[in-house]
Amino acid sequence: MSSMSTTLPLVRALTAPARANSSSVGNSSAPAKQKQLTVRILIGYNAILEDELDLVAGNNLIVLETFHDGWGIGMHPFSEQKGAFPLGCVEQPDDVEWASLIVSLNPPTYEEAVSLGSHAFPPFLSSAAEEYAILKNSIMSKYYAQDMIDSKNIAIESIKSKITSFESCLEFIDTEILSAKSDLDKAKNPPQESALALESSKSQMDVTHFKQTLSQLQKSRSHIQNVILKCDLQHSKMIEELKILTDALVELEDLREQLDCLIRRTFLGDKNEVNAAPQIFAKDLIKWKIVGQFENQLDEANFKRSLFKETKELLVVANAHLHAALHSWEVAYEANFSNDSSTMKEESKKAIEEVAEAISLITIAKKT
């Protein structure tokens, strides 16, 4: 089996809380005390099972009951929605001990856990469950880092294209400004022979026009410069954001390795510690073994299917040779009645050769 197929059922087991269901309320598995206290949510949590609560960091939560497995029953203050939640995600008040809310019974045996439709969590898994919840939520917060990096790269390329376009526009404006300055100088200081030919009022109008053109070009240049500056700042900001996203992507891979290490350390690392607990996750281990056996049978069936495919091809060819031999025998039989000895001998020899070839192919198929 692949590593993914071996860890999936264990991850599900880690997230499935060992808590009493509705049928157990009022019986011997009910808590000795019930208190209500409001606590602050420290770590966000995304519900996996239907009877779990979604937790948003910073919000408040009313704790109704807690259990030996590190899980509790809580209620959102405003929606009054009730459900299970991991105790590691909420703040524990200094003046309150979870023990005062914990079920005052011994941890249930495997048979009792099965009768409640839940898993029996050993004490050593409480910290693992809390660590898993932290890692899971950290991974989910960075899960879309790669998509955000791709979007950011597209935005960076777009802003770079805009900057290039604005710089080209600025070069064009600089050329126009130089031309306008040259025209203005000529209008202010025309050659003497031209000045005599032109009227003084017209010359003054040309100077005013060139001054206005130059002023507009300089304003446009200043505006384009400001736009380029803003684009440069935006580009620098995007580069910094891209670095943050890249670091988040690296951290995501590290978190995935930590999660894989946690699962292996908790379930596959110390076999003695797991086996010492009373039938810990026995149902999941049994299912895991069944899945393993099924996959082995499936692999064996696929292998036999591939062998049969080769065998079938050999048998099909052998069958064709047998049909050819049968046809040759029929021709030889008819030739015998018509006293055509040469045809009878030739077809009989051909039939024998076809049968020999068929037998050879069948023998190879048997060995395959």
Image (tube, grey):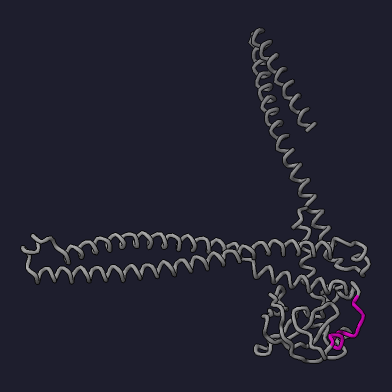
Q: Residue at x 18, y 72 (%)?
A: 208
Would residue 213 appear left or right of 168 to someone viewing this image? Answer: left
Q: Is residue 101 located in the magenta-colored stretch of the structure?
A: yes
Question: Eyeballing the image, is 158 above or below 328?
Answer: below
In what quadrant of the picture does the C terminus appear? Answer: top right
Query: Camera-side residue: 240 or 212?
Result: 212
Above or below — where is 200 with respect to 22? above
Q: Is residue 352 left or right of residue 274?
A: left
Q: Which residues are magenta?
A: 97-108
Left or right, residue 116 beside residue 133: right
Q: Nearer the viewer, residue 299 or 179?
A: 179
With respect to residue 368, does 223 lie above or below? below
Q: Nearer the viewer, residue 359 or 266?
A: 266
In the image, residue 36 lies at what x, y percent?
Answer: 78, 92
- Is residue 225 within the magenta segment? no
Percent across and percent down for residue 317 are 68, 28
